[in-house]
Image: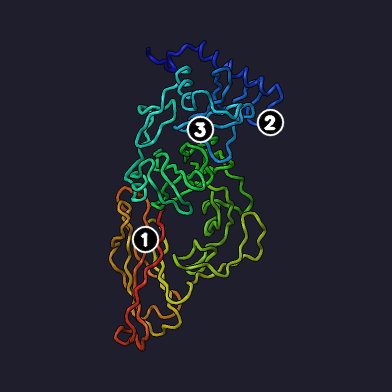
Amino acid sequence: MTKPTPETAPRAARAATRAAATVLLAAALAGGCLDSGGKGTGSDPCGAGDAFSAEGVGYCIFTAAIIIEGFDCPAAAPFRFEGSDGTVVCSPSEAPPTGGVDGLIDDWREQTGQPKPDTVGGDTLSPGDTAGDTDTTPPGPLSACEQGLADAGVGSAFTAPDHSGCTVARACAEGAVGALLTCADGGVYCDCEHGELRCVALAGGSCPARGGGTGTACLPALGASACGGGLWCEDGVCAAPPALCAGGCYRAVDCGAGSACVGGEAGTGTIGACRAAVATGACWSAADCASGFACQGATSCVGCEACPGATPGACQAGGGTTLGVVAGDGFAVDVWWQVGDAYAGLPCPAFALEVRDEATGEWVAGPSDATCTAGAAAFGLDVRSAGAVTPTEGFDYAWVRARGSYYTGCFGAVPESCTGEPVELVSEPVLVAP
């Protein structure tokens, strides 16, 4: 017998099934044995879910929805059961459905004409989606991080930062490769942000959406990538960020010419403060400094707080001799070199830039080596423009670091005057993403 589809299944039969479930669930609410203060009402006890009855029991079934941490079943059916494909069945009883959760879901699909989920690019599509109208293949080439996730098979062990005993439960590939894990401390979702592995706690068995519009469900832990168009993830739903106050900002464009936005981020709804732009080496926050340098002595305020005495600080290394990189305009970078007091008479340092090959994860030579002018680096901060780097083909960002060397025990401005062997330094990497 041909299974019904949403187009061919008798509408009357589907309506009758939903009506029977609604009556059963509404009766449970009216009987006073269940709290009606949660999601759903007596007339619509399943809310956004699908009411379905089987063996005289009314259920609420949720699918193709993002189940994020904090999701609760409706009050009329508060007990949650999850199918192998992530579909959630909410029941009025603690006992599992007769015939099992997956069996109930299969019956629901057949009686209501819901197609079974398919897979594309390793990801399970939600019921109602098909390979013909949903392309879940990630755009462009995969980074080494994404390839590692894509190669991790379901059931295989996976190392997730800050979590232990993890195995891959499900693959995700909706615009960006990701995976759902089952770990000793609960569910975890992992993906790659600018080629770096990111793992966050996630309840439920559905892959989270990202870059959604207003009203779209989202996962707050994904930060700025959870929503698109300058929206932020507020309580699990993409929404416009809070209105700016006088002097507040989300980005530099919110401030006047010659000003910078300190601490603002629309993707997380964090209001920053407009401050006068600072010269190289001065800072309002660590974002104004090269990698390996900290902003010390700055006094500022958060967002809309009154801040009459705001003053910038200075970028300082942690001690000794430090090499750092800071992103400039476009893909241009500057190299910072700070010499410790113990190395007076230090000869001019030479440095080279290295760029990470995102496809392999290996560091490769960047632009041609740059060497500072003799005598230019002695004490304090020396800044050198190192030109623009070229990202790996197919990627719109680059990770950059600098490698350099210096001598100790010097009595002049040439290496021959130094008694110590060359000491090599490698800077902390910095993300360049215009």
Report the disc number at residue 400: 1
Q: For residue 384, which quarter of the picture?
A: bottom left
In the picture provided, is 379 more to the left or to the right than 25?
A: left
The amino acid type of the residue labelled 3 equals Glu
Residue identifier under label 3: 82
Residue at horizontal 36 percent and vertical 37 percent from the top: 122
Q: CA distance from mark 1 to mark 3?
A: 44 Å
Q: Is residue 431 above or below residue 186?
A: below
Residue at horizontal 42 percent and vertical 22 percent from the top: 115
Q: Is residue 282 visible?
A: yes
Residue 326, position as x, y percentages in the image: 42, 63
Q: Is residue 381 above or below residue 199?
A: below
From the viewer's side, name the closer residue of 143 and 284.
143
Q: CA distance from mark 1 to mark 2?
A: 54 Å
Query: Around disc 1, counting alpha carbons within 10 Å, would you say few (fewer than 14), some (14 to 19), or many (20 or more)?
Result: many
Q: Is residue 223 visible?
A: no
Secondary structure, mark 3, is strand
Secondary structure, mark 1, is strand
Viewer-nearest of labels 1 and 3?
3
Q: Cβ–Cβ below 8 Å for labels 1 and 2?
A: no
Disc nearer the start of the sequence (1/3): 3
Residue 139, position as x, y percentages in the image: 35, 41
In the picture provided, is 232 more to the left or to the right than 28?
A: left
Q: CA distance from mark 3 to mark 2?
A: 23 Å
Residue identifier under label 2: 37
